[in-house]
Amino acid sequence: MVLAQLGGSISRAIQQMSNATIIDEKVLNECLNEITRALLQSDVQFKLVRDMQTNIKKIVNLDDLAAGHNKRKIIQQAIFNELCKMLDPGKPSFTPKKGKTSVVMFVGLQGSGKTTTCTKYAYYHQKKGWKPALVCADTFRAGAFDQLKQNATKAKIPFYGSYMESDPVKIAVEGVERFKKENCDLIIVDTSGRHKQEAALFEEMRQVSEATKPDLVIFVMDSSIGQAAFDQAQAFKQSVAVGAVIVTKMDGHAKGGGALSAVAATKSPVIFIGTGEHMDEFEVFDVKPFVSRLLGMGDWSGFMDKIHEVVPMDQQPELLQKLSEGNFTLRIMYEQFQNILKMGPIGQVFSMLPGFSAELMPKGREKESQAKIKRYMTMMDSMTNEELDSSNPKLMNESRIMRIARGSGRQVREVMEMLEEYKRLAKIWGKMKGLKIPKKGEMSALSRNMNA
Ligand code: GDP
């Protein structure tokens, strides 16, 4: 996703600034201008960017910087906080409760991914033990009911709709009533979209909303709409009580900054993002890990969750212990590669592991990256225990490198590339040194520590 480029530009701007010997107002301004440019290019609304710049200037105290405090950290923290603030409207959205009927209505422009997202949302909750149901109140688009029916059938989710009835309000009310009787605890109403915002769309939405009294209205937005995001989101918010946002197509080439604008316009949080056309390409959206990833800080909380999920229980304490000692050896890298290959949708896991995403595993090139990992592992298979367990980079001298290349049937330059990769990861993972080892359920504390 292009947001990764935004993260890269911001990190570079901070890096350049912290390279300066003296940080005065001019250097800080240059850095902030660079960041502003990057945000604008990513389609974040101008006013938001300007406010952010003003706030950072208020927060960052130049005297502190001059006194030799860690400049990079202070500025990065200020930017991190400001981006989080942009994405966090300050109040959580309504969350449906299992076992208690909730009606959730989806709104958005045609083509935004609304129908697909309704099913993803239903499927996500179904997997977590809910009893969801889908109601197709989109009578405007020919084929909308068929699409919903097809998706719902695939996911084994009950659905309601009609080929004959043209009144969306009537269908919505009938559907909601039926599923309430059937004790479904999450009734999802898909409404019509139009190609552009128009009075008829908003009027219809209002009527469906009045008749079904949804507990939550979710605004679905295509991440590629760019600078139009703010106005579009605001127009929807003015017509119905939007309480949450889902941003779709985050896997594509969209700049993604529109998500930030949509939050500002609706004062509602982004709760999920769509990352592909398939039913399970759908992720819970958490502000802090997202911004961490954006700034190349790595999503440690997601990473720890994955460790707990995938690394066998008996191996977890040992791995975490080694990492907290700052001892990132080649063997640990090898074991992580093994885990990654096991962990399933490889792209998603990678983007969660600090340092692994953009460089080692560019989006859309999963197969190549997988092959690369396997190649690295073959080379590591030719290493001695001493080499695998050492964290001393000097150990790997020329004759050892030649031996490994010969043993694994690879080129010397490939072994060197693998060792470079190890050094890069060791630097990033070295940040886990000294961390309190969290137990399951203590992830957010760890994430706070890492982000501090
Ligand atoms: P609606 O008109 O708003 O109901 O939109 P649809 O649900 O019909 O989706 C429009 C197109 O976008 C379809 O081809 C979907 O498969 C596609 N789509 C929806 N969500 C995503 C997503 O997160 N990523 C990608 N790549 N495509 C998506």
Image (cartoon, rainbow, N blue to C red):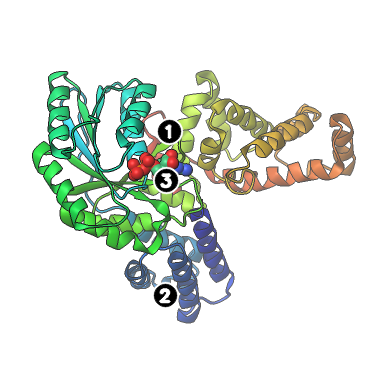
Q: Nearer the viewer, residue 17 or 276?
A: 276
Please say whether residue 148 is visible from this viewpoint: yes
Element on which disc 2 rests: helix
Counting every numbered tag in the picture gives 3
Whichever of labels 3 and 2 marks the residue nearer the N terminus, that label is: 2
Pick out the residue farthest to the bottom.
26
Judging by the rendered image, the residue that carries numbered circle 3 is 289
How far across and down, in percent of the image, does residue 117 sit? 35, 38
Residue at 58% x, 43% y is 429
Per the rendering, the mark at residue 438 is 1
Asked if 235 appears above or below 279 in the picture, the reply is below
Judging by the rendered image, the residue that carries numbered circle 2 is 63
Q: Which-is-in-front pick, marks 3 and 2?
A: 3
What amino acid is found at the position of numbered circle 2 in the picture? Asp
Q: CA distance from mark 1 to mark 3?
A: 17 Å
How far across and down, in percent of the image, does residue 364 sit? 59, 43
Q: Circle 2: is it few (<14), some (14-19), or many (20+) Cα within 10 Å?
A: few
Q: CA distance from mark 3 to mark 2?
A: 30 Å
User: Which quadrant contains ligand 1?
Assistant: top left
How far across and down, in percent of the image, does residue 107 sit? 25, 45
Q: CA distance from mark 2 to mark 1?
A: 36 Å
Q: Is residue 444 left or right of residue 315?
A: left
Whichever of labels 2 and 1 marks the residue nearer the N terminus, that label is: 2
The quarter of the displayed image where residue 19 is located = bottom right
Q: Is residue 394 left or right of residue 55?
A: right
Q: Is residue 148 left or right of residue 400?
A: left
What amino acid is found at the position of numbered circle 3 in the picture? Pro
The quarter of the displayed image where residue 357 is located = top right
Residue at 9% x, 43% y is 210
